[in-house]
Amino acid sequence: MTAGHRQPRYEGGPLVRPFMLTGGRTRIVHDTVRVESPLVAVPAALHAPLRFESRRIVELCQHPRSLADLSAALRAPLGVLRVIVDDLLTDGHLQVAEQPDVLSIELIERIRDRVRAL
């Protein structure tokens, strides 16, 4: 290892590369989901055979959570979460909760704080 190159470290265990979480996919079907869009799990999703991050997203979305909230909670890049959430939406495990047409200052500040936490 060279002096200027460090191995990535992850305090929670081994580092998993983002492309491994999405199977290398970057394209999404539901391109209308915004960073602040509130996502909520459908009741049956808790009993679905989901894996790893998908299971955790469903658990977190028992109450509405934005994509930014999920990204911060899971410490995963927003683009990765967008792909996983897209799969969950496509499979009917998540849905986009109704959202206001205008964002409140509080919501904008909360999104900003969550993104900074990344």
Image: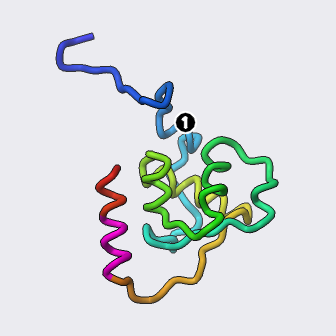
The answer to whether residue 66 is above or below residue 73 is below
| Other-residue count near label 1 (Cα within 10 Å), few / some / many at <14 / 14–19 / ≥20 | few
- In the rendered structure, the answer to whether residue 46 lies left or right of residue 22 reads right
Name the residue rendered at 58%, 53% in the picture.
Answer: 84
Residue nearest the observer in this picture, 113 or 5: 113
- Percent of width and height locating residue 71: 46, 54
- Percent of width and height locating residue 68: 43, 61
- Percent of width and height locating residue 64: 57, 70
Name the residue rendered at 44%, 89% in the picture.
Answer: 101
Q: Main secondary structure of the magenta part?
A: helix
- In the rendered structure, the answer to whether residue 38 lies left or right of residue 93 reads left
Name the residue rendered at 36%, 59% in the picture.
Answer: 114
* Label total for image: 1
Q: Which residue is mark 1?
A: 20
**Image: magenta residue range:** 105-112
Residue placed furthest toward the bottom? 101
The answer to whether residue 79 is above or below residue 22 is below
Residue nearest the observer in this picture, 25 or 85: 85
Instruction: Inspect the magenta stretch and tell me whether residue 37 lies in it.
Output: no
Q: Which quarter of the figure is the N terminus placed in? A: top left
Tell me how the rendering is colored: rainbow
Residue type of the residue flagged with mark 1: Met
The answer to whether residue 95 is above or below residue 71 is below
Instruction: Inspect the magenta stretch and tell me whether residue 110 lies in it.
Output: yes
- Percent of width and height locating residue 38: 53, 72
- In the rendered structure, the answer to whether residue 3 lies left or right of residue 19 reads left
